[in-house]
Image (tube, rainbow, N blue to C red):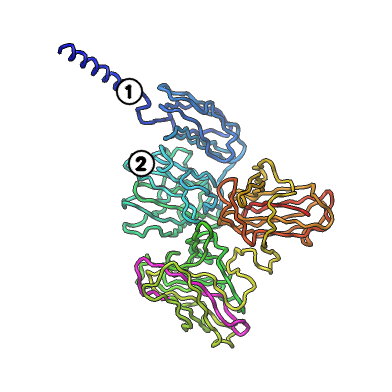
């Protein structure tokens, strides 16, 4: 019996010893990585500095920044260790503006960051800056474009700092650190160095939206610093504007803010502005940041950023006999529709969400673009809003009718009305003009939501009118009305917005047509990428088959590609398939060099149609539409003729395949 007890005791001791050894095993400890400093500052002369890094997991280095060829790190990876590593970071001499990079030392689950700043001998402060975050292609990753700097008091995960956001076609950055172990997270999104003194417009505008699961007292402030040098804790930050949503504010509604910097920083030539988040549960989203010379485009009112009630001068344009708009020029939702034709007004102009605004809805097979009105968060008991067509010459219209599509949505159904109204005495004031209802497009109670309905309005009663104002008038609050495919008379094209969609015969810029089914190319396509010319060798998958293709441009930089040794000379035909990036437009210019012409000229510009498959990375699975195939005539082609395909910075990205000269 004693022998059994002794044996049991010995077995228990062995077991406890094993447990104790497991507890000291690093694999059973939480992953941890730390650095001795989070900021390094270098002068223009360059130099070296060291940091100490300690990690109980294997790690490797990730460098975040634009063209970081000026910086060297002595060690880029290491295995887990109980001893720290000494890492040397060196910079080359700098003759130019200040440059920055972030070094992320990453394990599989956590990371530590070091922000490296090299002060230039030339001021990098700019008098204008804007970012609509259009370059974002993936959600929930670090944002590295446009010179922003980011910091979070909890750098252990990208989710606890500012990160990219995507919803349908909306792109923005956001902060939502609710899963952080910290009681409160402080996170900065900092602009590049700005020169307010020399800016033509000393104004900062931006849009924010709120979301929360459990509402807390999170704050979002605009802060400024004139001594920031990479260390957020050491810098002096002054609050210049409070953009915090009040308790109980509506979620998922964009609100525009305008900050006048004239009095506070009007004479300052170098200052950083940052969006500082303090909190944990509330999610803040940030979009359409505009400063300085570009600040004239207020997302709420592109006509006059200083006076939201200014409706612009479109209503003064001469009367037209035909008009059409399918809103395909819309690129971003929840902003004003920029147009030389439409005029908009609302009884509550304090926020774009209380007016007619743009919307984009993406499904797997199509992208739907339209206007909508949904003022349910307005403080007014009832909102009246107008979307007015250009002045119509009904006398010369044929047919004398208006067609349009509507769809209904509501959270809490109310008695909202949607009517077509006309006025012959409108003179710039929607409230004093005489409006006559000619058609009631209001949905009856309990109507089906999210279903498009087509309406036709007979204007034969106004057959003699040569100067008539026609508008869609919304009266209500809760119900959402959507508007699309507006046609009066027989328009030659559907081009009501400023962007255009390539179907306007007046701009000598034809859209494509039905294809020939040939996706291979007899022109030499690139076999390697060129970052300097922003052209890329990619693949497309069409009907299950893979073909070589050419991608031009990147997020906000146009691309160019020149091909020679054309397979035929004399008078020949160029054919190809071309699409713009998903949810974007692209202007493709084809220039003929060293002899020859294209469609009778030296170059030809085409507006390509966006395609759902033109997104993410190669290979791209493309389903070509009936407007994606192009045929162009080349004359006088010689053995020395080359073709240059290029895109501009404003509308840069497209994919081409099936390029053939015959």
- Mark with earlier residue (1, 2): 1
Does 310 sit above or below residue 565?
below
- Helix, strand or loop under label 2: loop
Q: Which mark is residue 464?
A: none
Question: Which residue sits at x=45%, y=47%?
Answer: 274
Residue 478 appears left or right of 366 = left
What is the spatial separation of the Cα atoms under label 1 and label 2, in whole angstroms? 28 Å
Does 351 sit above or below residue 129?
below
Does 594 sit above or below residue 336?
above
Q: Is residue 491 magenta?
A: no
Camera-side residue of 121 and 167: 167
| Residue 403 in sight from this viewpoint | yes
Residue 298 appears left or right of 184 = right
Camera-side residue of 83 and 590: 590
Question: Are the two marked residues, 1 and 2, in contact with CB atoms closer than 8 angstroms?
Answer: no
Q: Which residues are magenta?
A: 388-417
- Helix, strand or loop under label 1: helix
Pick the quarter of the image with the N terminus. Answer: top left
Question: Which residue sits at x=50%, y=77%?
Answer: 455
Camera-side residue of 239 and 70: 70
Question: Which residue sits at x=64%, y=42%?
Answer: 531
Q: Which mark is residue 180?
A: 2
Does 582 sit above or below residue 496?
above
Residue 331 appears left or right of 566 = left
* Residue 612 coordinates in the image, percent (x, y): 56, 55
> How many other residues sit within 10 Å of disc 2, few (<14), some (14-19) or many (≥20)?
some
Q: Quadrant of residue 242?
A: bottom left
* Residue 526 coordinates in the image, percent (x, y): 70, 44
Q: Which residue is mark 1?
A: 22
* Residue 302 coordinates in the image, percent (x, y): 53, 64
Camera-side residue of 359 and 255: 359
Residue 587 appears left or right of 206 = right
């Amino acid at each position: 019996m004693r022998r059994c007890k002794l044996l049991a005791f010995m077995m228990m001791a062995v077991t406890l010893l094993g447990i104790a050894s497991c507890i000291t095993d690093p694999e059973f400890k939480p992953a941890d990585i730390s650095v001795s400093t989070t900021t390094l500052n270098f002068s223009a002369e360059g130099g070296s500095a060291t940091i100490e890094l300690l990690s109980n997991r294997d790690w490797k280095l990730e460098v975040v920044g634009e063209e970081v060829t000026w910086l060297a790190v002595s060690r880029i990876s290491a295995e887990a260790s109980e001893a720290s590593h000494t890492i040397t970071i060196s910079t080359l001499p700098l003759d130019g503006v200040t440059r920055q990079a972030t070094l992320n030392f990453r394990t599989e689950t956590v990371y530590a960051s070091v922000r490296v700043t090299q002060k230039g001998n030339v001021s990098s402060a700019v008098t204008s800056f804007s970012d609509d975050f259009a370059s974002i292609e993936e959600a929930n990753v670090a944002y590295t474009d446009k010179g922003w700097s980011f910091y979070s008091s909890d750098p252990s995960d990208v989710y606890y700092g500012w990160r990219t956001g995507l919803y349908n076609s909306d792109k923005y950055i956001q902060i939502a650190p609710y899963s952080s172990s910290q009681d409160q997270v402080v996170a900065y999104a900092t602009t590049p160095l700005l020169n307010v003194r020399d800016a033509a417009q000393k104004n900062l505008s931006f849009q924010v939206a709120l979301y929360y699961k459990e509402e807390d007292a999170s704050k979002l402030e605009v802060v400024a610093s004139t001594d920031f040098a990479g260390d957020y804790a050491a810098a002096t930050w002054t609050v210049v504007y409070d953009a915090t949503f009040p308790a109980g504010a509506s979620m998922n509604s964009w609100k525009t803010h305008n900050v006048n910097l004239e009095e506070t920083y009007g004479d300052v030539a170098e200052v950083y502005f940052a969006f500082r988040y303090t909190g944990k549960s509330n999610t803040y989203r940030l979009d359409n940041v505009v400063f300085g010379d570009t600040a004239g485009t207020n997302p709420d009112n592109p006509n006059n950023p200083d006076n939201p009630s200014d409706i612009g001068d479109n209503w003064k344009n001469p009367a037209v006999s035909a008009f059409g708009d399918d809103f395909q020029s819309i690129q971003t939702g929840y902003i004003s529709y920029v147009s030389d034709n439409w005029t908009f007004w609302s009884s509550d102009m304090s926020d774009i969400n209380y007016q007619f605004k743009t919307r984009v809805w993406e499904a797997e097979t199509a992208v739907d673009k339209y206007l909508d009105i949904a003022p349910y968060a307005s403080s007014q008991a009832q909102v009246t809003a107008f979307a007015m067509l250009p002045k119509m010459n009904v006398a010369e219209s044929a047919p004398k009718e208006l067609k349009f599509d509507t769809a209904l949505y509501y959270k809490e159904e109310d008695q909202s009305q949607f009517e077509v109204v006309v006025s012959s005495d409108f003179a710039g004031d929607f409230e004093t003009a005489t409006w006559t209802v000619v058609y009631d497009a209001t949905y009856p109670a309990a109507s089906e939501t999210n279903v498009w309905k087509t309406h036709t309005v007979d204007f034969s009663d106004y057959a003699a009118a040569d100067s008539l104002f026609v508008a869609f008038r919304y009266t209500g609050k809760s119900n959402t009305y959507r508007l699309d495919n507006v046609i009066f008379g027989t328009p030659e094209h559907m081009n009501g917005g400023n962007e255009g969609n390539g179907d306007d015969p007046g701009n000598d810029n034809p859209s494509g047509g039905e294809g020939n089914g040939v996706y291979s190319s007899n022109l030499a396509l690139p076999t390697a990428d060129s970052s300097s010319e922003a052209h890329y060798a990619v693949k497309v998958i069409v009907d299950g088959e893979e073909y070589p293709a050419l991608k031009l441009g990147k997020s906000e930089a146009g691309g160019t590609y020149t091909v020679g040794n054309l397979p035929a000379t004399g008078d020949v035909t160029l054919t190809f398939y071309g699409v713009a990036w998903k949810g974007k437009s692209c202007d493709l210019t084809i220039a003929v060099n060293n002899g020859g012409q294209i469609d009778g000229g030296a170059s030809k510009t085409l507006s390509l149609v966006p395609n759902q498959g033109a997104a993410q990375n190669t290979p791209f699975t493309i389903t070509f539409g009936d407007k994606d195939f192009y045929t162009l005539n080349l004359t006088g082609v010689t053995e020395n003729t080359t073709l240059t395909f290029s895109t501009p910075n404003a509308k840069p990205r497209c994919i081409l395949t099936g390029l053939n000269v015959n």
